[in-house]
Amino acid sequence: MKILMILSNPFTHDSRVYNEAKTLIKAGYDVTVLAWDRKRENLLNEEKEGIHIVRSYNTKLMNILPYDIFRLHFWWKKGYIDALGLFEKKPFDVVHCHNLDTLPIGIKLKRKFGIQLVYDAHEIWGYMVARDIPKWWSNYYLWKERQLIKHVDKVITVNEPLKKYFCRITNKTITIIMNCKNLEQTDYIHPKNSKLTLLYIGTLSKSRFLLELVDVVKDLKDVQCIIGGIGSKINYVNDLKEKCSKTSNVKFIGKVPMEEVLPMTKKVDVIICMTAPNDLNNSRALANKQFEAMVCGRPIICTKNTYPGEFTDKEKCGLVVEYTKENLKNAIKRLRDEDDLREQLGKNALKTAIKEYNWEKQEEKLLELYKDLKK
């Protein structure tokens, strides 16, 4: 069976899509990823561990437009044309759309070729864009998703809160495939840092409490922090980078290659994952950091009144605090001063990853879904 995955990023840092594609290839499927490279920074065609990657670049008109949200409808047209070209060379049996911003392309392909369509919703897309656009506009995308989801054959999402949301807008069977990571180890390994070392790698945005994190850490004794990742808001990223440069114990490292994230996680003591409780999307989602911390046996600090906080409390794999600098500071100091607590939380995290929250468990569900598509 030949599969076309469609993705609205350049496929350089999307570990979920990478894991899904690798799992399917290992099981004998042929996988091509059509990825939107908005800045034309990567190769047009690339082969990575058996995954065929074809990137779609912006047209001149798309480049003139000031924001990606304005380019979206043009991307749907451009992505569809590129997918038609791929189908001519090697017809595919299934189109696997990652998130709402690729789904219109998949639906047009299904209608034209009569192929099966998988919708893989990593998030509630309308809630995600609500941070940056007027409410009426984000509501339009919520409405659009309700209309488009009627045409898909299978729905995948990432956790229980999102499954509950999608159950309200469709009667399709919904499979939860979490963003878990491959098991790196089965024995707890204590980190060897002279100072408590904190790590954040992920999206660099206001809702992740990163400027506040720098304020908290800069005056803490025997604590150091590493912040890495990428962000769409250039001014915010530059402000964060500058703020880090003015401290002696916070290091900004920028983009981190996907294959280096877990090795870095193993070397630190604590993972930071503060999420704004009023963020409609992130407060319902478990970040990659949560699962990276678990497979490496590292405790995490999360926010109260969010699903990550609820999950962390349930699995006893970290500390959950109010979304304030004072509460974050107290949690960091506690983990700095209580080595036994830090170790126990890390052991709990690894134990839970081994038992349930690992990619090996998730890929069983993905393969079962694709086996059902073959029938």
Image (cartoon, rainbow, N blue to C red):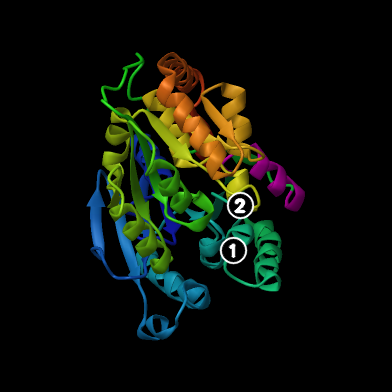
Residue topped by disc 1: 131
- Residue 181 visible in the snapshot: no
Question: Residue placed at 55% from the left, 40% from the top?
Answer: 326
Image coordinates for residue 68, horizontal then vertical, percent: 47, 73
- Residue 14 visible in the snapshot: yes
- The quarter holding residue 64 reads bottom left
Please report contact status of discs 2 and 1: CB closer than 8 Å, yes or no: yes
Instruction: Say if 226 sits above or below 343 in the image.
Output: below
Question: Residue placed at 50% from the left, 40% from the top?
Answer: 370
- The quarter holding residue 285 reads top right
Judge from the rendering whether residue 238 lies leftward or rightward of residue 103; answer left or right.
Answer: left
Q: Which of 61 and 201 is in front in this view?
A: 201
Measure how far apart labels 2 and 1 are at the Cα level. 9 Å
Instruction: Of the two numbered discs 2 and 1 on the same chain, state the one appearing first in sequence.
Output: 1
Check residue 166 for magenta coloring.
yes
Instruction: Point out which mark residue 281 bears.
Output: 2
Boundaries of the magenta span: 157-170
